[in-house]
Image (cartoon, coloured by chain):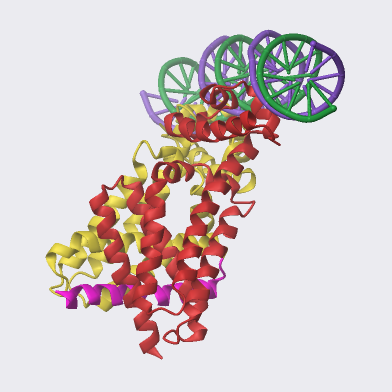
Chain colours: A red, B yellow, C purple, D green
DNA sequence: TCACTATCTGAAGAAAGCTTCAGGTTTACA
DNA sequence: TGTAAACCTGAAGCTTTCTTCAGATAGTGA
């Protein structure tokens, strides 16, 4: 593992190169040599830090997803005890903002994520997201406790699914703002419906 | 292109073999020889019907998505003029049912679909879905016309995103039934909120 | 400055995959 | 039944890619 500063830079540039190559030629044609070239190092160097190509992709993907999920968790913790409408607004806004900041990266990493379906990386990340949301929802009396589990699944998948679809469209910023507003309307309406239903 | 009956069978079994191989070894290790073997034909035969591996995957994916989308379109057309709640119920139920019927196929094809991002296949399919939903929504006076465009995007991405997430979890049938109920609650609440908002 | 460690290089071995094609088999139909 | 078209075979050429490793370079601490 890297200890000197230059090797830390190296690892960093390999990560970035991976994204760049993905952007330019797609995952099908992403090769170790291409990544190394783009990073300005030799292949051998790459193999000093990752046992193989898969491991590289895995690391890049995991880091990306984890960082994103941490933002969601932060927003959830920060909204504990708030009104339902505020909860929804906070989490939706935080997620969209975070996603916007790493837009291209996100988009291009969709392409490699299915490779790790077996491994369950996506499932683990999704679980973290759902749990954070569930904890937040439990902090309000408005949602019936027996609904929380499922409501958080709906919340999570609606949020991520919608944003993914909108981003995949190559949507302009204005559209994302509209998506944000509509997501807030939808999720608030949903949670309200759940609480008045019983 | 196939004209005799046996060659139609051949093409059919190549399609099925593609799915099977995807299920067993994943897209990364899907090779032309493996597919041919699984289909019980020789590689050469495969190349009689598809110019290359990509074309094979594309065809299989496109066929799958198109069939799915046709079910959505059918449900939308069949719900024109109905109450909002009925629209939602019909479309959600139709989509989930259709998806359930081709569950494994769906799951495994997520893995190859990002390869055709450039091509825009997914975008075209999504567009068809959104347009069908938009046409349906326009048939009721309850939704403000200026909201229809975006509401159909929300509808589509919520529906597909949620179902994808739930299926990816390897959810049991009971969970899908719950997802169906909650999706109906959510989308109905959303559309209702849209119509009362203005 | 010296010696030891960390880091980097890139040619080349080895494996794997895509695609072709010359020749064989089956079917249609006159 | 004979022949042309349709269909199938699978070994082998060719390319691409992964990964290794012996040797070079750069940093670090004494």
The x, y position of residue B159, in whole percent, is 37, 64
The x, y position of residue B109, in whole percent, is 49, 48
B11 and C14: which is toward the camera: C14
| Quadrant location of the C terminus of chain A in the rendered image | bottom left
B5 and D1: which is toward the camera: B5
Quarter location, residue D8: top right
Image: B143 above or below B10? below
Left or right of A9 on screen, residue B50: left
| Quadrant location of the N terminus of chain A in the rendered image | top right
Instruction: Residue at 35%, 68% (x, y): give it.
Output: A89
Does the stretch in magenta take in B102? no
Instruction: Residue at 29%, 54% (x, y): give it.
Output: A176
How many numbered discs sit on the rendered protein? Answer: 0
Left or right of B122 on screen, residue B29: right
Quarter location, residue A45: top right
Quarter location, residue A97: bottom left
Q: Is residue B19 visible?
A: no
Q: Main secondary structure of the magenta part?
A: helix
The x, y position of residue A55, in whole percent, is 65, 39
Image: A177 above or below C8? below
Image: A8 above or below D20? below
The magenta segment? B171-198
Does the stretch in magenta take in B187? yes
Instruction: Residue at 27%, 78% (x, y): give it.
Output: B85
């Amino acid at each position: 593992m890297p200890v000197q500063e230059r090797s830390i830079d190296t690892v960093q540039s390999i990560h970035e190169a991976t994204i760049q190559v993905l952007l330019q030629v797609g995952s099908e044609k992403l090769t170790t040599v291409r990544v190394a070239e783009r990073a300005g190092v030799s292949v051998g160097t790459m193999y000093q830090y990752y046992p193989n190509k898969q491991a590289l992709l895995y690391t890049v993907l995991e880091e990306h997803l984890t960082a994103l999920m941490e933002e969601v968790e932060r927003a959830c913790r920060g909204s504990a005890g708030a009104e339902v409408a505020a909860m929804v607004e906070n989490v939706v806004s935080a997620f969209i903002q975070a996603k916007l900041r790493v837009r291209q990266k996100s988009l291009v990493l969709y392409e490699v994520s299915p490779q790790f379906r077996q491994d369950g990386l996506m499932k683990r990340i999704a679980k973290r997201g759902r749990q954070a949301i569930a904890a937040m929802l439990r902090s309000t009396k408005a949602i019936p406790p027996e609904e929380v589990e499922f409501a958080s699944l709906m919340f999570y998948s609606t949020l991520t699914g919608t944003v993914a679809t909108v981003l995949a469209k190559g949507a302009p910023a204005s559209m994302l703002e509209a998506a944000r507003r509509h997501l807030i309307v939808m999720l608030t309406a949903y949670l309200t419906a759940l609480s008045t239903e019983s």
